[in-house]
Image (tube, rainbow, N blue to C red):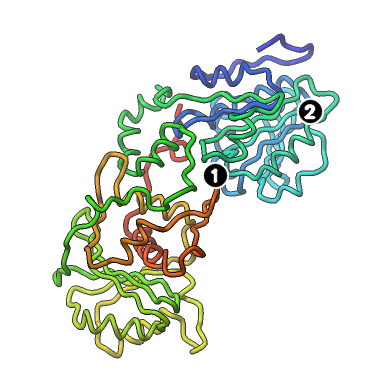
C-alpha cells in the first residue's frame, strides 16, 4: 500500500480482509470502487478504508456519505462506530453536526446524506467514501469529486462500495469504460468465509427469497439489466396458470386498483404456502360502487371473511366526499358482510420492491412456485405477459396500453402485505465479522 508518510501514526486494527477487500485497500487509484453481492463485506471495506485514510491524512477533513439519512444513521455510521469500539480507537462525535474527530490524528469526518447533493459544495476534502453508491445520484458523486482538493492531503482519494444495479452510471464509470484514474475491484460470490461460518445456508435462504434474475444480481453480484423488457419475467403459463376454484371455507382476499377506466380488482386465497388467484373483475368506466355491486353478484356470502387490499391513495377523499375504502366499508355494512378487514399501507412500497416480490412468488431462484392463476383471469395473465418497463428505467410503461398493469398492480399490493419476509440476516441485519 506504499510507504508511510512522515508524521503519520500507526495503529494496529483487528481486521482480516478477504482477497477482494485486500485488493481494494491496496489500489492506488485516485477514485476506486468495491463492487460485490450482499454478504461480500462492502461495509467493512468502506469503514476500514475510511479509517486508514484518517491516519494517512492526519489533521485533514474527510467525508462518509450514504444515499439517505436513515441508511447513513442505521448502517454506515453504526458500522463505523462498531469498528472504533472494538479496536478501542479514541474519538469524539458531535451529533448536532454529524462530525467525528479521530483523537489519534485530529482528523475529522463529516457524515452526510447525499440525497440533497447541492449542499455538498464548499469545504475542501482530503478523501471521501460513499456507501451503496448505485443508489446515489451521479451528480452527488461529481460534487464530491470536485471537493477532493485539499492541498495538504498526503493521499487524495474518493471511493465507493456498491451492489450492482444494472447498467447504470456506476457501471459505466467504473466497470464498462473506466474513467481515467478510476479502478473497480469486483468481489466474487461465496468469498466471505467469515459470513458462511456464521450462516452456512446464507445463499440457499436467499434463493427462497429472490427470483432467479434478482438472485443473480444481489447474491452473485452480476451486472444485469433488470429494468428492461418484461416486468414479470418470472411468469410462465406452463407453471403459473392452473385451474383453481373459490373455497368457501377460506377467507377471500380482494385487491383493488382504483382506476375509473378500467376499474380493476382480483380475488385470491391463501392455501398453505400457495397464493391462488381465483377471479378478476374488470369494469370499463366504472366507479368503486359499481365494482362493489359486481363483487356482490359473484360473492354474496363469505362466511370465512374477507380482507381488502389496494393502493394507499384509495384513502384520499373523492368527489363524493368519501374515500374509495370508505365506499367499500359502507357497502360491506349495508350488505351484511360481517367479517371484513382492511390491510392497506400508509404509503405504497417502491415499484422495484413490489415487482421483485411478485417475481419471487411467481418463481423463486430455488424453483419454488408460490403463486398460481386461474385461466379465467385473462386480463391478469395478459399483464404478466405484456407489461414492460420504460427503456432503461424502473418505471412501468403504462402509456403503451391503457388497459395494462392495473390488475398486476392490485395483486402486487396484496402480495406486498401477505408475502414479504423480513430475513434475519444480511449485511445490515448483523455484523459479518
Residue 6 to residue 351: above or below: above
Q: Nearer the viewer, residue 377 or 351?
A: 377
Which of the 4 image quarters holds residue 104?
top right
Which residue, as the protein is rendered here, is positioned at the far right?
A: 151
Q: Residue shown at 28%/50% (left/top)? A: 236
Q: x, y percentage for residue 204?
A: 30, 34
Residue 168 x %, y %: 58, 40
Q: How crowded is mark 1: few (under 14 residues within 10 Å), some or many (20 or more)?
A: few
Residue 195 lies in quadrant = top left
Circle on res. 166: none
Query: Does residue 69 appear to the left or right of 39 in the view shown?
Result: right
Q: Can residue 77 be seen in this view?
A: no
Residue at the (39%, 58%) spot, across then down: 386
Q: Earlier in the sequence, mark 2 or mark 1?
A: 2
Q: Name the residue under label 2.
A: 60
Name the foreground residue: 14 vs 31.
31
Given the current orientation, which residue lies at the most extreme front position? 400
SS at circle 1: helix
Q: Is mark 2 on a helix, strand or loop?
A: loop
In the displayed structure image, the side of residue 7 where residue 164 appears, left or right? left
Please report the residue visible at 55 percent of the width from the left and 35 percent of the height from the top: 162
Residue 415, given in percent of the width and then of the height, sits at 34, 59
Mark count = 2
Q: Is residue 332 above or below residue 9?
A: below
In the displayed structure, does residue 143 sit left or right of residue 274?
right
> What is the CA distance from the residue labelled 2 to the residue labelled 1?
26 Å
Residue topped by disc 1: 74
Residue located at (65% from left, 27% from top): 178
Foreground of the two, 238 or 59 = 238
Rendered location of residue 147, percent (x, y): 79, 36
Amino acid at each position: 500500500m506504499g510507504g508511510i508518510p512522515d508524521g503519520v501514526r500507526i495503529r494496529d486494527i483487528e481486521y482480516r480482509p478477504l482477497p477482494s477487500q485486500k485488493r481494494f485497500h491496496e489500489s492506488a487509484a485516485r477514485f476506486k470502487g468495491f463492487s460485490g453481492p450482499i454478504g461480500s463485506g462492502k461495509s467493512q471495506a468502506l469503514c476500514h478504508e475510511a479509517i486508514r485514510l484518517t491516519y494517512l491524512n492526519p489533521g485533514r477533513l474527510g467525508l462518509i456519505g450514504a444515499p439517505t439519512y436513515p441508511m447513513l444513521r442505521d448502517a454506515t455510521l453504526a458500522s463505523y462506530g462498531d469498528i472504533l469500539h472494538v479496536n478501542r480507537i479514541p474519538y469524539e462525535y458531535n451529533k448536532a453536526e454529524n462530525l467525528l474527530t479521530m483523537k489519534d490524528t485530529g482528523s475529522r469526518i463529516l457524515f452526510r446524506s447525499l440525497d440533497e447533493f447541492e449542499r455538498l459544495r464548499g469545504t475542501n476534502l482530503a478523501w471521501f467514501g460513499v456507501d451503496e453508491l448505485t443508489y446515489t445520484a451521479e451528480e452527488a458523486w461529481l460534487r464530491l469529486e470536485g471537493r477532493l482538493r485539499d492541498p495538504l492531503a498526503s493521499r487524495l482519494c474518493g471511493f465507493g462500495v456498491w451492489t450492482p444495479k444494472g447498467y447504470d452510471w456506476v457501471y459505466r464509470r467504473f466497470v464498462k469504460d473506466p474513467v481515467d484514474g478510476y479502478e473497480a475491484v469486483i468481489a466474487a460470490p461465496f468469498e466471505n468465509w467469515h459470513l458462511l461460518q456464521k450462516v452456512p445456508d446464507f445463499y440457499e435462504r436467499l434463493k427462497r427469497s429472490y427470483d432467479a434474475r434478482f438472485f443473480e444480481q444481489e447474491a452473485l453480484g452480476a451486472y444485469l439489466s433488470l429494468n428492461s423488457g418484461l416486468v414479470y419475467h418470472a411468469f410462465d403459463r406452463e407453471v403459473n396458470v392452473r385451474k383453481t376454484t373459490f373455497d368457501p371455507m377460506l377467507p377471500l382476499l380482494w385487491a383493488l386498483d382504483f382506476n375509473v377506466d378500467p376499474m380493476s380488482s382480483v380475488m385470491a386465497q391463501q392455501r398453505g404456502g400457495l397464493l391462488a388467484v381465483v377471479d378478476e373483475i374488470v369494469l370499463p368506466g366504472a366507479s368503486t360502487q359499481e365494482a362493489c355491486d359486481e363483487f356482490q353478484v359473484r360473492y354474496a356470502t363469505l362466511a370465512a371473511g374477507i380482507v381488502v387490499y389496494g393502493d394507499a391513495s384509495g384513502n384520499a377523499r373523492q368527489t363524493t366526499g368519501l374515500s374509495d375504502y370508505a365506499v367499500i366499508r359502507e357497502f360491506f355494512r349495508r350488505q351484511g358482510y360481517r367479517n371484513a378487514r382492511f390491510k392497506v399501507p400508509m404509503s405504497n412500497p417502491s415499484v422495484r420492491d413490489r415487482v421483485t416480490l411478485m417475481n419471487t412468488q411467481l418463481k423463486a431462484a430455488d424453483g419454488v412456485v408460490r403463486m398460481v392463476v386461474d385461466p379465467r383471469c385473462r386480463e391478469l395473465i395478459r399483464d404478466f405477459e405484456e407489461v414492460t418497463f420504460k427503456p432503461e428505467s424502473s418505471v412501468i410503461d403504462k402509456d403503451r396500453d391503457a388497459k395494462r398493469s392495473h390488475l398486476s398492480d392490485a395483486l402486487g399490493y396484496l402480495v406486498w402485505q401477505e408475502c414479504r419476509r423480513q430475513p434475519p440476516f444480511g449485511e445490515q441485519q448483523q455484523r459479518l465479522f
